[in-house]
Image (tube, rainbow, N blue to C red):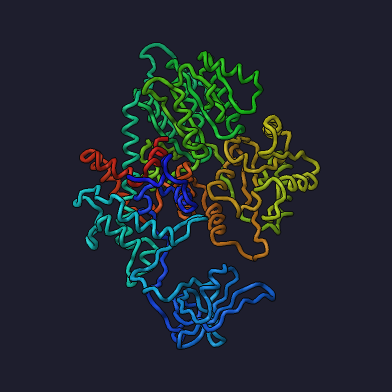
Amino acid sequence: MSSITPSPSTKPLSGPQKALRKLGLLRPIDLALHLPLRYEDETRIVKLSDAQEGQLLQIEGVVTACELRQRGRRQLLVTVDDGSDTCLLRFFSFYPTQQKALAVGNRIRARGEVRGGSLGWQMMHPTFKSALAELPAALTPVYPTVAGLPQAYLRRAVQGALDRAELTETVPPDRLYATDRRPAWSLHHALTFLHNPPPEVSLETLEDHSHPAWERLKAEELLAQQLSQLQAKRERAGFCAPALRLPLHGGPFLPQQLLAAFAFELTRAQQRVIREIASDLERAVPMHRLLQGDVGAGKTVLAALAGAICIAAGRQCALMAPTEILAEQHFRKLIGWLEPLGVKTAWLTGSQSIRERRAMLALIASGEASLVVGTHAMIQDKVVFKGLALAIIDEQHRFGVAQRLALRSKLSQDRQEPHLLMMTATPIPRTLAMSYYADLDVSTLDELPPGRTPIVTRIVNEGRRDEVIRRIHEQLAQGRQVYWVCPLIEESEALDLSNATATHAQLSAALSDVAVGLLHSRLGSAEKKDVMALFVSGRLGVLVSTTVIEVGVDVPNATMMVIEHAERFGLSQLHQLRGRVGRGGGASACVLLYSTGDSTRLGDTARERLRAMAQTSDGFEIARRDLEIRGPGEFLGARQSGAALLRFADLLADGALLDWARQTAPWLLDRYPLLAQQHIQRWLGGKAEYLKA
């Protein structure tokens, strides 16, 4: 298909063309699939005598006065007479060409919200045009745009693209999505309709995407997603991975030794999941498994066991974590479990000295280090593995696609990949697992280890801050420790939020008999390590921190957490933070300290989040509510690609469409592979690559 990308011989792109590229509208089909956000009805003229207060309408009349008022705020005042009444058009921002178009005697159409009634009608900043042109026959689309791309230019570009785009059907007619009530629309009909809807159509069905034309587009989009993921899964089946089989005789082998060394029994869920992982590792096809489990469900134990299977088979295992704090937590745990069994480990982060880093790189390249733990530093070019066979990525949603692909590329043999185990403590609701993660095998830890203490969650107004500090005194007197989490590091004029530095000073003064630590992302690596070591050892009673402690921090003696300005945090983030307490035997509590600022009440969304936190500690229920509140794009970060993979379909409302797409994708890919590929390219283009990570 043609593209607006210039060849060396063409003229440079204009401003609007550059803006089109910024939106990713490179092909005619991209423009054809760039659908309106809303519509304006410019097909009807309403007489002012029939207008109602607050009504959005279009009038037509003659300009009888045009005054540029300079006193006070500069504004242009234009009076229009439509024969039944007059209306004052008020503009605070305008160009000389617009002022000329509104000269006395000109006949214009103006569209906006009318106000005033008996005091005289007014419109603030209406849209307007000359009345010489005929009234349009269809509703006027309003498209998503960026600076430098006017709606008029975009409308012309879309209309031209509709004529040039390849809109042949990629799904046989008898397999198109349809219901008993509504037969399927053709793709061409649906797109033409949505870009040029007739005035009699229900605006509600257009804007809530329930119209049959929208159903056709949403079904196509979901099918493209399912096809691309199924194709990625089948492509991986054509690659090889090291088959990590333990010898049939001898032993005890490393995994059994590790199990025997644990001071606890695996839960039934952990036993089930490690069997699933071990079965994958035995095959010469790359494992691509997502391990999801609530905070504290024991994912690190399974990572250690999976690593032990890999190491026992004579290969290397790498575990990558998003932050140095989390990576170090894993490193300490894994060393404690595996080094006594003779496993050599290496540690890689960006903050290491050159000398230490060279030593680690040599251990990895020689294969002497069987287990490598670190941050994204391990995906740099200088890191060469001798025999990487298993890559484990913790909190995988915190990494971008390129980073995950880079780690997998460390096994550089032809058409070989390491096995990949991705872990997340943000459980994935079923509808998301069926769509965004359809290319993965998903294992779920749905059982917490025994001994996890229930966490009591309280929602407390900022005005009761002194009461909270008194409760901290009580916890400290019992020999317990406390987290206090703040959303910002320093003062911000834009946001009236307390900051970690000021809170640390306040708590240090109020709790003068205990040591209060401060941890935030701007501290150097060594400073962070020292602060965490002091807190882990119990020498700090209170740790004031930003969200750098969101994942991975494990201090069993910490039994209370205060989250300041909790209304500013996302639901999954609040749940992750709360999971830092309740990890020992003591009764634990989480205080959600909220502020309403000048208002006396919280916003609806913030109230829903805090209420959900108080009502349940079940991570899967939290995830379901988070999806309802935020929607899948924000929940997943568009699969951490920076590009939304679903623009139109709503996974909460379009379950029937998703079921159809899941059933149709393998059928189409098996019977009509060329049509399936055409369908993927039409909808996703290069974005299909995002799903391979």
Q: Quadrant of the N terminus?
A: top left
Q: Residue at x 50, y 33 (%)?
A: 403
Figure check: 129 above or below 685: below
- Camera-nearest residue between 444 and 370: 370
| Residue 339 makes an appearance in the image | no
- Work out whether 441 lies above or below 347: below
The residue most toward the top is 250
In depth, the one of 134 and 438 nearer the eye is 134
Asked if 220 appears above or below 260 in the picture, the reply is: below
In the rendered structure, the answer to whether residue 65 lies left or right of residue 279 reads right
Residue 359 visible to an observer of this rendering: yes
- Locate the C terminus and report the quarter of the image it occupies: top left
Residues 307 and 33: in front is 33
- Vertical position of residue 411 compared to residue 368: above or below: below
Q: How many numbered marks have been drawn onto this rendered protein structure?
A: 0
Q: Position of residue 5 (x, y in %)?
A: 41, 44
**Where is residue 573 shown, x and y percent of the image?**
56, 46
How far from the left and from the top, in percent, is residue 499?
Answer: 70, 48
Residue at 25 percent of width and 53 percent of height = 177
In the picture, measured across the screen, residue 439 lies left or right of residue 559, that is left
**Percent position of residue 682, x then y:** 33, 46
Residue at the spot 50% in from the left edge and 29% down from the top edge: 301
Residue at 54%, 82% (x, y): give it. 79
The answer to which quarter of the image holds residue 674 is: top left
Instruction: List the single residue furthest toward the left.
Output: 174
